[in-house]
Image (cartoon, rainbow, N blue to C red):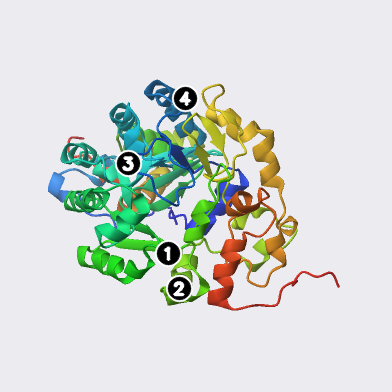
Amino acid sequence: MLQLPRHALHKKLVGRANPMRIQLEITRRCNLDCVHCIQGGCSDVPGEMTAADYERLLPGMSAAGVFSVSLTGGEFLCHPEIMVILELLLRSDFWLALQTNGTLLDQDTVDFLARSREKIRAVAVSLYGATAKAHESVTRSPGSFDKTIRAIDMLSDAGFRVEVISLLMTMNQEEAPQIQELCRERGLFHQFNSIIAPRKDGETSSLECRLSEELLKKLPRPWETFTENFIPHEPDDFSPDKTLDAWCTMARTSGYIDSKGNLLPCSIMDLPAGNVKDRPFDELWHDSAVFNALRKLKIGEFECSRCGHFPTCRPCPGLAFLEHGNMFEAPKEICRIIELFLGDKEVNKHEEE
Amino acid sequence: MFHFCQELRPAKKLGVPMGEVVFKKSASLIERRIDGEAILLDIKSGVYYDLKDVGVFIWEILSGGASARQIAAAVAESFNVDAETALADTLELLNDLETEGLIVRDAEG
């Protein structure tokens, strides 16, 4: 039997902390000003990785075992050398995914990407409304809706798998059904969530856009499909004495390289292993004291492990880190949403007898 | 004991005996070496595959394109098995690999 089922692959690679998937934050620059963005919007970031830096980085990532690379930002198309960087990535042997607001995509760029379409698993496009009014109330950028819709259509026509991602908040939640209908008409995969987190710099004004319990209850329940995508596990995998292997892939099979070259466990946790401009990727990944400490953490050290909803809710330690500056606490916003949909369950399930 | 794999597609169209058909790796694969194993990802399907031991050895030979007979000769020499067994096992693996779309027949081979 040659096929390797996902759970078997995961066990094989997580035990070895083989980096399967890496997100590359190509730039923190963005041409939009989304109200909820945890990056906070940047026009320039000193010390950004250059195309030459990526040319040195990519072979090392391949040799270290990375299969998949996702491009993100900011808006990755804002990088001044993006076409050179894309050329490097498309010549590489990674399976790529792109995350974009779509507004900077033109037909030439789509045609360029389409020449290597088979190497691009999907293009995720952020869409916040079925109308310009709703969408641009989030992006705070007039004209962005039409550009995003045009990009979605160009990508679809070129044969890409387009995944529309919608974050729902107070100013656009009314259009949730219309967004779904827009995607259904176009035959697009659509995913939404309503988790709004504080900015990475600690600024919390975006939290005012969080949906009330009343509005959350009106949304289609995502949790059934949310949990479908999780890797099958054994019941014992979430015992308090186990490491986080079955729960969170950060610094195990997934990681994040920010726009300055810092290797992080994920897109949210600001715990650098080091900088890929200074040391080889493989060396940082396997030898970092920070990463090795993360790999040794036990489930019982986390507040979530003592809740009846765990592990069904699959809480994100990164979100807890953003909310509280402490990954061991429960991410309260996820708790609020989960309790609405799953109901209150008896907590303290791991009380000592 | 000679093992004849009846699932192989006949090579009559090419007028080439089965053992002489040259195979090459599919272009839709990403492969990585992890702990001596070859982990393959077929980006057409998103399915992962795993090759070990002799499978890895054969997979390496396929890098440049090779026939079952060429591969079997290398297997026999490297793993100290008789030629018939090597050929039978090689044909079986090649059949599995071809069925999964991991290798294709090289029309120019």
Question: The disc numbered 1 marks a residue on which chain?
Answer: A
Q: Earlier in the sequence, mark 2 or mark 4?
A: 4
- Residue visible at 49% across and 53% down? A206
Q: Name the quadrant of the C terminus of chain A.
A: bottom right
Under circle 4, the secondary element is: loop
Q: Say which residue label 1 marks.
A: A170
Q: Amino acid at mark 4?
A: Pro
Residue at position x 48%, y 28% in the image = A60
Q: CA distance from mark 2 to mark 3?
A: 64 Å
Mark 1 or 4, closer to the camera: 1
Viewer-proximal residue among B7 and A281? A281
Judging from the image, mark 3 belongs to the subunit labelled B
Rendering coords of residue A325 (x, y %): 66, 48
Mark 2 to mark 4 CA distance (whole Å): 41 Å
The amino acid type of the residue labelled 2 equals Leu
Instruction: Please tell me whether residue A13 is drawn above or below residue B76 in the rendered image.
Output: below
Q: CA distance from mark 2 to mark 1?
A: 8 Å
Q: Which residue is mark 4?
A: A46
**Other residues around mark 1 within 10 Å, as few (<14) / some (14–19) / many (≥20):** some
| Same chain assignment for discs 2 and 4 | yes
Q: Secondary structure at mark 1?
A: loop
Report the front residue among A79 and B14. Answer: A79
Please state the chain letter of the residue tagged with numbered disc 4 in the rendered image: A
Q: Say whether marks 2 and 4 touch (CB < 8 Å).
A: no
Q: Amino acid at mark 1?
A: Thr
Q: Secondary structure at mark 3?
A: helix
Q: Disc 2 marks which residue? A: A215
**Residue beneath disc 3:** B68
Q: Regarding mark 2 in the picture, which secondary structure is present there? A: helix
